[in-house]
Structure formats: C-alpha cells, structure tokens
Image: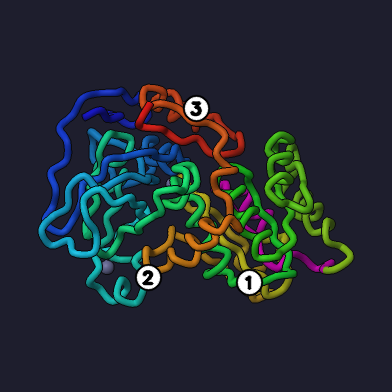
Amino acid sequence: MRAIVYEAFSVLPQLRDIESPTTPISGVVIDVEATGVCRSDHHAWSGHDSTITLPHVPGHELVGRIASAGPEVTNFHTGQRVTVPFVCGCGRCRWCLGGNAQVCPDQTQPGFTHFGSWADQVLIHNADANLIAVPDDLPASAMVGLGCRFATAFHGLRVRANLSAGETVAVFGCGGVGLSAIMIARAIGAQVVAIDVSDAALDRAREHGATHTVNAGGKSPAELSAEVVGQFSDQCPDGVAVSVDALGREESIAAAISSLAPMGRHVQIGLLAAPPVIDMSRVIGLELSVLGSHGMAAAAYPEMLDLVVDGQLRPQDLVTNVIGLEDAPAAMEALGANTGSGMTIIDLSR
Ligand SMILES: [Zn+2]
Ligand SMILES: [Zn+2]
C-alpha cells in the first residue's frame, strides 16, 4: 500500500510502498477514505512525542471503510463506514468502562503508538470499544476532524469546561482546533472573542461565529489580556468565563489565564514542546480551573455526531484545503510555518 513514511525527526517524509497491516484478533484494518493534517502530526514529526518509534507513518484523524475485521470483533463488519477517536482505549480498564477511554493507561493511538492513517490502510486496535459507525451520506470532510481537532474542542468546552449559553469564551489561536472551538461555543450559545496574529484567520473566525476579534500581533500577554477583557466590558468587566489555548505557547497561556474572571475555567488543547510557566498565584486567588482536553471517548460521540448529522455543527465548513497523498510531505512541512486557519485533509481516492 501507499504510505507517507519518515525515517528521522524533522526530515521530510516520503511517499512509499510498504506492507499492508495485518488484522489483529480484536482489531480492524480500515481502507482510509480521507485523513486530516493536524498540528499534532507536526509535533510528533518534530520529535516532541516520546511514544514515536522510527520509521513512522503519521495520521490520526480518519474516516474510511472496514477492509477486514478480527474474529473477536462483534459490533462492526467489513464494508462498514467508520471513524475513530485518536485515543483508542483498551476497552477493559476502569477508565474505559467508565466512559473515559481518552485517558486509558493502555491506550493506543494511530499515528503515534503505531503506524497512522496517512496511508491507504490503517490498523485500529480494540475495534468494538473504539470504532464509531458514521452515515454513508455525510461528506468525508464533515467527519475527518471528529477524530482529533473537532472532538477535542467539543469535549473541552462541552464536558471539561461545562460551557453554557450566554457565557463568554476567549479562544487563543484560530487554526483548525481553534475554529472548531469557536463553532462549538457558538452552537452552545456562548459569546466568543477570537485571538490570532493573522487578520485573515480572524476573518475566518468571524465567519464561524466569533462575535469579537483581537489581533495579538506585537502585544505582551498583559496588553493582550486587557484587550480581550475589554471586549465584554459591559457585561463582564472582570474577565471571561472560559479561555481556550488552541495554540500551545507559553505566552498565549499566560494571556488566557490573565483574561479569566474569578472562578473562570481554562481549557488547554494546544500541545507544548516544553512545560509552560503558569501563574499559580492567580489560579489560587481567583479559584481558576485549568483543564486538559485529550480527545474524546468513543462512548461520548453520539451527542456530537447527532449535531453534525442534523447540521447544527458543520465541521466540513472548516476544511479549506483537500490534497492528495503525494502532497502530504509538503503539507507536513508547511504546518511548521503555518499560522493559517482552517483544516487540510488528504483525500486517499485522489
Ligand atoms: Zn482502558
Ligand atoms: Zn490531532
């Protein structure tokens, strides 16, 4: 099969022919229909993820059809169209059984712990616990992001921050996951201020529901948070209820924490190369919550999928670029410099 392979970190990946995966007893092999180009692919390729062994095939957001299923798979069948969270649980531990496979200690992740979906086929372990059946008539572009970016934003806002209608949210970074957070926050009924250094990204943020925008260019975290808080000076002058760092930079986290009102909730989605310094005095004094979001368990997907199927959430609108597999190495490289907005997906049928 065709696959994008890298032999060393930060060395341009190549399109190669490699062996197709062998179907595990309780897993499946999926014919990939489309797969996402996510910043965490770049994070792994840059050597920031200790789970990667070389050589490696990236890719962890996917939709496709089951090509073969192991003998222990009972809930899914060959030919079925499916997606999968990037964190696949073991299906047996107390976290998985409690509906929180996204923190399973024995998790597997395509594109991280084993070869991923930038290939004609990908292997998924513990299929019964992790696959999600998806309708045949939804476009692939509506489902690719459900594996990582869209689901991580949904879980972060809906479950971790328990965001409710009428609250205010500040989203730092308007790439794929940031725009997802903006779309989801608006669907919940929150008011959203979007922050980015690119005016083009801020224009897209407005298209997807941001009610306010702030250009962060050249501003210190203190200047930036003052401007963010100023956006809602009438209704909540002491800060926003929820902040989201969708960027993964120490400065954006500092600005986000400084933008929160007392008892505010910060959701950390952006991955970092090194642990950031966080103003814990402010966290203590204002009783702030700092919350991680690590994808979403398969068990939690029906609520989000229903909203996508009936059109209340339209992840397909976030897809700005559809490329073929041969263009994936250049797309990986571009992620490093990319502060652009929207999502790139790889169409395997091309
Ligand atoms: Zn588990
Ligand atoms: Zn991702």
Q: From the viewer's perspective, is residue 202 above or below residue 311?
A: above
Q: Are marks 1 and 3 in contact (CB under 8 Å)?
A: no
**Which-is-in-front pick, marks 2 and 3?**
2
Give percent across and percent down for residue 316. Answer: 54, 44
Label 3, secondary structure: give it. helix
Quadrant that contains the N terminus: top left
Give percent across and percent down for residue 136. Answer: 39, 49
Residue stretch in magenta: 236-256
Q: Amino acid at mark 2?
A: Asn
Q: Residue at x 67, y 75 (%)?
A: 263
Is 251 contained in the magenta span? yes
User: Mark 1 or mark 3: which comes first in sequence?
Assistant: 1
Answer left or right for 321 relative to 285.
left
Q: From the viewer's perspective, is residue 283 above or below residue 218?
A: below
> In terms of image quadrants, where is residue 21?
top left
Marks 1/3: CA–CA distance: 36 Å
Q: Which residue is label 3 attached to? A: 334
Q: Which residue is label 1 attached to? A: 288
Is residue 297 something one can see in this rendering?
A: yes
User: Mark 2 or mark 3: which comes first in sequence?
Assistant: 2
Q: From the viewer's perspective, is residue 284 above or below residue 326?
A: below
User: Mark 2 or mark 1: which comes first in sequence?
Assistant: 2
Would you call the spot at circle 3 few (<14 residues within 10 Å), some (14-19), or many (20 or more)? few
Q: Is mark 3 within 8 Å of ligand 2?
A: no
Would you call the spot at circle 1 few (<14 residues within 10 Å), some (14-19), or many (20 or more)? many
Q: Amino acid at mark 1?
A: Leu
Give percent across and percent down for residue 225. Answer: 75, 54
Q: Which residue is label 2 attached to? A: 100
